[in-house]
């Protein structure tokens, strides 16, 4: 590797990078640059350059000058002081830029790759015969953005795709993501699987739009592996991503083209093999990659090959019969240690000609991989065949523990199964890869498809599927508490294979030959995992299907209770405050009450309380929070206690009881360091973050603006560390409200933009709408009242329709201010009266002092001579603020009343009202309200 200026030249890969991005350089221009850069500060004559660049062709110097001009243009030579190539008249050219050299990219690749966070399987230590393919694919992918590697099963599509991904890690600054679609049986999960691999948590049925929102503006490489069995869904996804995200590059592998706009097909040919030449020698044969692969894999399996010319002809014959297919060659080579080279060739020839015919018109040497698998399967022992067929129940990777649990039976004890799996790995029938300190196993897709076609008694299939369900049911029960803490793609990788098997098990359970009773239990165990991963649509799908399958013996039991709760929560966040969500949550709580289990009741009361908060039933929500608090006091569980205090805190806060709210919120945060256990697996978000966010608002209301802003910002940081989109959106919403209150509009705008990024990416529509409402409020406060009013009117209409009423009161107050600023006083007065009635009816009393203050100011403007009425509203606002302990609202009402008194020349009264209140503040003197209070006091002297 040669580096100069912003460029890196990788000569052996014919690649020139500018700050990690490939430079489009013609072949001749690249050869000129490589020749000159290899001899820095040395004059290279035109004759020497012509000899190096056009070794077998006679060309004129004009061609050299033409390509030299293109090279200089590509380098920017001579621009902005950059100087790379000097022309010496009559002598030639000289590379004059300072350079530095390093080892080859292969030497440093592992070190470089370790510094990135690409989600890629390990590349082969030595990839035989595919270096040119990898280079060609890398070049084509950079130039065209969308390439599909097409070829028959076993030709090495995945191997080459992984190699290309590793080669381009630096180009994409680590944003290379490998998505194995082979683990899917349901095409509708393609987009969700891609999103999960990228660390996203889709919140709606339209996962593709969420992916596009995430990928927009990001330079990313997506490798979609094994598309053929979900080809329509993969094609649709690739088309949308390619069209809508111009910086995303897509590399797909499939047995057939996707046949969509933008796709460039790269047909991966089999490995080249030696010709049928009686005079073939060892040295010639070993020059072909197919022969190299065979010899290497045979040696790796324990065979000792010391080839002579005769043996080389046998190897060449095997490679030709197998069409140069890498997988078929590996399988054949793996038999050499057991049968010897010549016997292996004889068996292969016999089976190909007699038992495994390919297409009628195909010559014998062009038989399919199906024939190779038939042959390989025929060489297995009966017990190995049994184990292989049973392992085909797995989708994607599995652990040895899972294999032993499912394959072992009264006729196949654990020791024999373990030995058979070991043998199948050695015979290349099972692929292996490390996963931390353990190994993960997988049947190659072609091998699994082959095994699933084998005749097996229905009773055995049913028993095998039931054991598969039972194992993953136990796996969910054992690992369920880990899921809320898994945030990165790397952490999810091992668990996602398990989820793929859970999905397959659920499909079987609720299929025509399945076991619905097992399916109910599995769906119940899977629901918290789906909630923890924010797979809300999938959670509702399986919960609803399981609920329909309940019979008289399971109705009203613990499974229905948990399924109804999961269905209600997922509906609440995906469809808003719908009756179906209410019905599901109420049904769940009724069962919990009937059963009398305190922890069950608490975990259903939490979602019910949040449902009523979101739909504007604040008094009902408070009653549920109070019941949570009572129940939590009867059990010793820190997560439950945190939940109860958090919910009580937000309900008391919204009810205007700020002293009690602060006590509850601080109790929620009192229980030591953050536990791995959170409320996300049944509530949908982290209760501690909610407590922190509401505590920040409570501190502002109590007269601690600096501490409020500091805590709000810290809460956002804590939520970011959790990497849970719904929790982060909650933290951002409440932080923005605090920043608006303290008058830090620039920082509020910054957090609104962050809210948009998070909520749009994960389709959290209510939070997007609230963000637009905050934008409208900022516009009004900054003097652009007209646009602010238009925005807030649309926002409130959308929120009422959802319904999502949690923040409609403060946004209505902002709209009232906008109406007043634009002279629309009648509309302002009508809206504030309507909002006051709503608050009185529903219990959102936190904002009542501010509503009364706003009404006082409107009365003064709209009703001449109604000063007494206006003053009465202000005094009611002051009285209520003091009763609530809301010093923030009290200060605003006091300033308005002091201004009113001063207008009557009652300066002493005005000062006596405002001065003591102002002096009670010990912080926040740079915030908007306290600055205004200080200026007003200065005029009252």
Image (cartoon, rainbow, N blue to C red):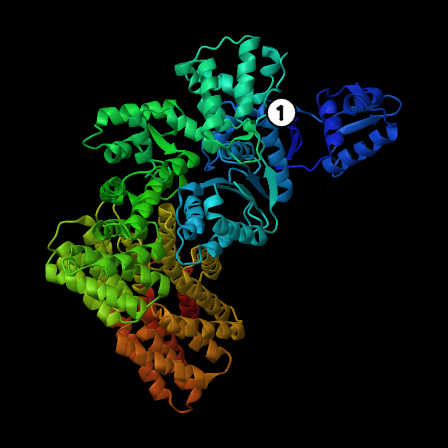
Residue at 42% over, 37% down: 445
Q: Quadrant of residue 761?
A: bottom left
Whole-percent x, y for residue 936 in the image: 42, 71
**For mark 1, does the 10 Å Cα neighbourhood hold few (<14), some (14 to 19), or many (20 or more) residues?**
some
- Residue that extends furthest to the bottom in the rendered view of this protein: 865
Residue 128 in sight: no
- Say above or below: 11 vs 911: above
Q: Quadrant of residue 675?
A: top left
278 displayed left or right of 241: right
- Say above or below: 216 vs 890: above
Whole-percent x, y for residue 125 in the image: 49, 23
User: Disc 1 marks which residue?
Assistant: 1
Q: Secondary structure at mark 1?
A: loop
Q: Quadrant of the C terminus?
A: bottom left
454 displayed left or right of 318: left
Residue 258 in sight: yes
Residue at 57% over, 22% down: 289
Q: Quadrant of residue 402?
A: top left
Front-most of residues 799 and 423: 423
Front-most of residues 531 and 936: 531
Whole-percent x, y for residue 297 in the image: 47, 19
Front-most of residues 569 and 672: 569
Count how many numbered circles sit on residues in the image.
Answer: 1
- Say above or below: 105 vs 566: above
316 displayed left or right of 469: right
Q: Quadrant of the N terminus?
A: top right
Whole-percent x, y for residue 851 in the image: 35, 76
């Amino acid at each position: 590797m040669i580096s100069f200026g912003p460029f890196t030249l990788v000569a052996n890969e014919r690649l020139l990078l500018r700050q990690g991005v490939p430079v489009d350089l013609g072949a001749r221009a690249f050869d000129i640059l490589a020749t000159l850069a290899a001899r820095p500060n040395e004059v290279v004559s035109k004759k020497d350059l012509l000899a190096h660049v056009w070794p077998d062709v006679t060309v004129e110097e004009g061609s050299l000058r033409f390509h030299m001009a293109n090279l200089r243009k590509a380098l920017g030579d001579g621009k902005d002081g950059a100087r790379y190539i000097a022309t010496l008249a009559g002598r030639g050219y000289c590379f004059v830029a300072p350079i530095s050299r390093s080892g080859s990219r292969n030497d440093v690749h592992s070190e470089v790759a370790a510094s990135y966070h690409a989600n890629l399987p390990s590349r082969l230590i030595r990839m035989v015969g595919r270096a040119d393919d990898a280079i060609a694919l890398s070049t084509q992918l950079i130039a065209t953005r969308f390439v599909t590697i097409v070829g028959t099963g076993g030709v090495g599509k995945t191997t080459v795709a992984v190699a290309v991904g590793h080669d381009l890690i630096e180009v994409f600054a680590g944003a290379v993501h490998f998505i194995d679609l082979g683990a899917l049986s349901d095409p509708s999960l393609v987009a969700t699987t891609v999103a999960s691999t990228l660390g996203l948590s889709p919140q709606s049925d339209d996962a593709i739009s969420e992916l596009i929102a995430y990928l927009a503006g990001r330079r990313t490489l997506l490798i979609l592996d094994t598309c053929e069995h979900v080809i329509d869904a993969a094609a649709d996804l690739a088309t949308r991503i390619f069209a809508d995200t111009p910086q995303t590059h897509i590399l797909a592998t499939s047995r057939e083209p996707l046949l969509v706009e933008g796709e460039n097909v790269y047909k991966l040919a089999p490995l080249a093999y030696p010709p049928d030449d009686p005079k073939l020698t060892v040295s010639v044969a070993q020059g072909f990659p197919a022969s190299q692969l065979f010899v290497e894999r045979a040696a790796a399996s324990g065979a000792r090959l010391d080839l002579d010319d005769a043996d080389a002809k046998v190897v060449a014959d095997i490679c030709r019969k197998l069409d140069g297919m890498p997988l078929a060659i590996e399988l054949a080579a793996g038999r050499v240690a057991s049968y010897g080279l010549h016997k292996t060739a004889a068996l292969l020839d016999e089976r190909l000609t007699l038992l495994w015919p390919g297409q009628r018109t195909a010559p014998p040497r062009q038989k399919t991989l199906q024939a190779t698998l038939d042959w390989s399967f025929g060489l297995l022992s009966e017990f190995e065949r049994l184990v292989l067929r049973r392992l085909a129940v797995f989708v994607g990777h599995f652990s040895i523990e899972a294999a032993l649990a499912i394959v072992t039976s009264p006729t196949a004890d654990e020791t024999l199964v373990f030995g058979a799996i070991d043998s199948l790995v050695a015979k290349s029938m099972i692929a292996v890869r490390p996963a931390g300190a353990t190994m993960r196993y997988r049947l190659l897709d072609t091998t699994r498809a082959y095994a699933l076609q084998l005749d097996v008694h229905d009773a055995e299939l049913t028993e095998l599927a039931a054991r598969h369900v039972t194992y993953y049911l136990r796996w969910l029960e054992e690992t369920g508490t880990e899921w809320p803490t898994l945030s990165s793609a790397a952490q999810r990788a091992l668990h996602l294979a398990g989820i793929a098997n859970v999905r397959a098990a659920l499909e079987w359970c609720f299929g025509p030959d399945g076991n619905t009773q097992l399916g109910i239990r599995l769906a119940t165990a899977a629901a918290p995992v789906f909630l923890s991963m924010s797979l809300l649509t999938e959670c509702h799908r399986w919960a609803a299907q399981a609920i329909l399958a309940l019979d008289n013996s399971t109705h009203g039991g613990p499974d229905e209770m948990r399924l109804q709760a999961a269905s209600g929560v997922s509906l609440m966040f995906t469809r808003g405050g719908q009756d179906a969500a209410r019905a599901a949550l109420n049904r769940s709580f009724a069962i919990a009450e009937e059963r009398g289990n305190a922890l069950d009741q608490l975990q259903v009361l939490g979602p019910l309380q949040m449902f009523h908060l979101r739909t504007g039933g604040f008094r009902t929500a408070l009653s549920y929070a109070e019941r949570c608090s009572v129940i939590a006091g009867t059990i010793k569980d820190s997560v439950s206690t945190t939940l109860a205090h958090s919910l009580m805190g937000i309900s008391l806060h919204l009810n205007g009881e700020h002293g009690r709210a602060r006590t509850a919120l601080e109790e929620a945060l009192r229980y030591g360091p953050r536990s791995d256990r959170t409320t996300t697996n049944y509530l949908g978000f982290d209760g501690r973050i909610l407590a922190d966010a509401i505590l920040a608002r409570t501190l502002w209301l109590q007269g601690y603006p600096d501490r409020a802003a500091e805590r709000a910002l810290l809460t956002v940081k804590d939520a970011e560390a959790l990497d849970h989109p719904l929790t982060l959106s909650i933290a951002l919403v409440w932080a923005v409200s605090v920043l608006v209150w303290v008058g830090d509009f620039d920082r509020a705008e910054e957090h609104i933009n962050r809210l948009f990024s998070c909520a749009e990416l994960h389709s959290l529509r209510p939070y997007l709408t609230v963000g637009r409402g905050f934008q409208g409020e900022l516009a009004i406060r900054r003097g652009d009242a007209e646009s602010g009013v238009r925005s807030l009117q649309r926002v409130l209409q959308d929120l009422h329709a959802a319904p999502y009423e949690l923040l409609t009161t403060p946004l209505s107050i902002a709209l009232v201010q906008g109406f007043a600023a634009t002279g629309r006083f009648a509309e302002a007065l009508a809206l504030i009266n309507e909002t006051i009635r709503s608050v009185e009816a529903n219990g959102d009393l936190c904002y009542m002092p501010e509503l009364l203050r706003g009404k006082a100011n409107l009365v003064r403007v709209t009703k001449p001579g109604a000063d007494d009425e206006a003053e009465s509203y202000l005094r009611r606002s002051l009285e209520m603020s003091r009763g609530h302990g809301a010093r923030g609202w009290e200060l605003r009402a006091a300033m308005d009343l002091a201004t009113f008194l001063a207008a009557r020349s009652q300066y002493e009264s005005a000062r006596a009202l405002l001065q003591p209140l102002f002096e009670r503040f010990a912080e926040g003197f740079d915030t908007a309200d306290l600055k205004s209070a200080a200026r007003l006091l200065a005029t009252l002297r």
